Amino acid sequence: MSSANAPRKIFFTRNWPYAIDLLRQRIGNSAAIEIDAFASEDTCIPREELLQRVKGCSGIFCLYTDTIDAELLDAAGPSLRVVSTTSVGFNHIDVEACKARNIRVGHTPGVLDVAVAETAVALTFATKRRLLECAASAKNGEWGVWQPFQYCGSDITGSTVGVVGLGRIGATYARMLKNGFCCKILYTGPREKPEVAKSLGGDPGSIEY
C-alpha cells in the first residue's frame, strides 16, 4: 500500500475505552483510519514511548498530563494534523508550535462548568451543615445522647454567599445558589460583570462588588 493510501493513524495517549469506542462508532468500518492507544488506563505513558508511538500519526488524543511540545510534534512528523486534549486548559500544549506546523488544537471548554459548580455547592453544604464532622462522629462511635444543637450547622437558604472570580464556573455556582436557595450573591474579581445580574434574576441590586 502506498503512503498516499495508507490509513491515517490516531493515537490515544491513554487507554480510554469509552472514547475509543465512541470514535469507532463515528468512523464505522472505515479502513482509512487506524486507532492505536497506550495500554494503561491509569498510568501516564512514558515520554520516550510517547515520542515513538506518535510517529506518522495524523491525530493525537492526549490528556493534560502529556506535554505536547515542539520535540513531540517533530517526532510525529508532517502527517500530524490535529491534537485534541480532554481538558479545559491547554497549557501543556505548545500552541504556537502547532500553529507554525498548521496543526489544529482542540480542547473542551465549558465541559466541567456544571460538575465543578455542583461540587462547590456540595462543599458549601458540607461546611454549613458540618457534614464531615457528623460523619466522623458517627463512624467513630461518638454519636451519643441526642442534643438539640449538636452539629446543627446553619441554613444556606437565604444566606449571603461570596464568590471570588465570576467566570463560567463561578457564575454557574452563583446561579445555582441564587435560583435554588434564594441566596444573595456577592462577588469580587479583576473585572466588574454587570451582565451577571441579569443571568441571576435581572435584579441589579442582587449583585454587589
Image (cartoon, grey):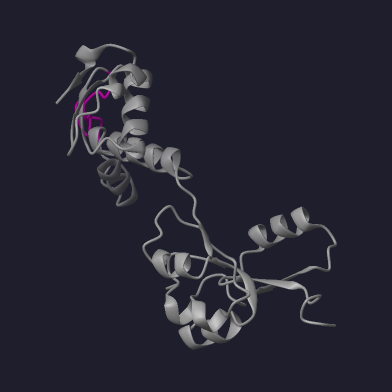
Q: Is residue 125 above or below residue 155?
A: below
Q: Residue furthest left?
A: 209
Q: Is residue 109 above or below residue 209?
A: below
Q: Is residue 187 above or below residue 204?
A: below
Q: Position of residue 94 (x, y in %)?
A: 40, 68
Q: Is residue 5 above or below residue 26?
A: below
205 relative position to 118: left or right: left
Res 201 visible = yes
Residue 149 colored in magenta in the image: yes
Identify the residue shown where x is 32% and y is 12%.
202
Identify the residue shown where x is 59% and y is 79%.
54
Report which quarter residue 113 is drawn in: top left
- Image: magenta residue range: 145-157
Residue 167 colored in magenta in the image: no
20 relative position to 189: left or right: right
Report which quarter residue 3 is drawn in: bottom right
Q: Position of residue 178 (x, y in %)?
A: 32, 21
Residue in front for this viewpoint, 159 or 174: 174
Res 45 visible = no
Residue in front for this viewpoint, 2 or 71: 2
- Tell me the quarter of the image containing the N terminus: bottom right
Residue in front for this viewpoint, 32 or 49: 32
- Please state the total of marks drawn on the protein image: 0
Identify the residue shown where x is 22% and y is 21%.
159
86 relative position to 25: left or right: left
Q: Position of residue 209 (x, y in %)?
A: 14, 26
61 relative position to 135: left or right: right
Report which quarter residue 92 is drawn in: bottom left
Task: Label the magenta part by its dominant secondary structure.
Answer: loop
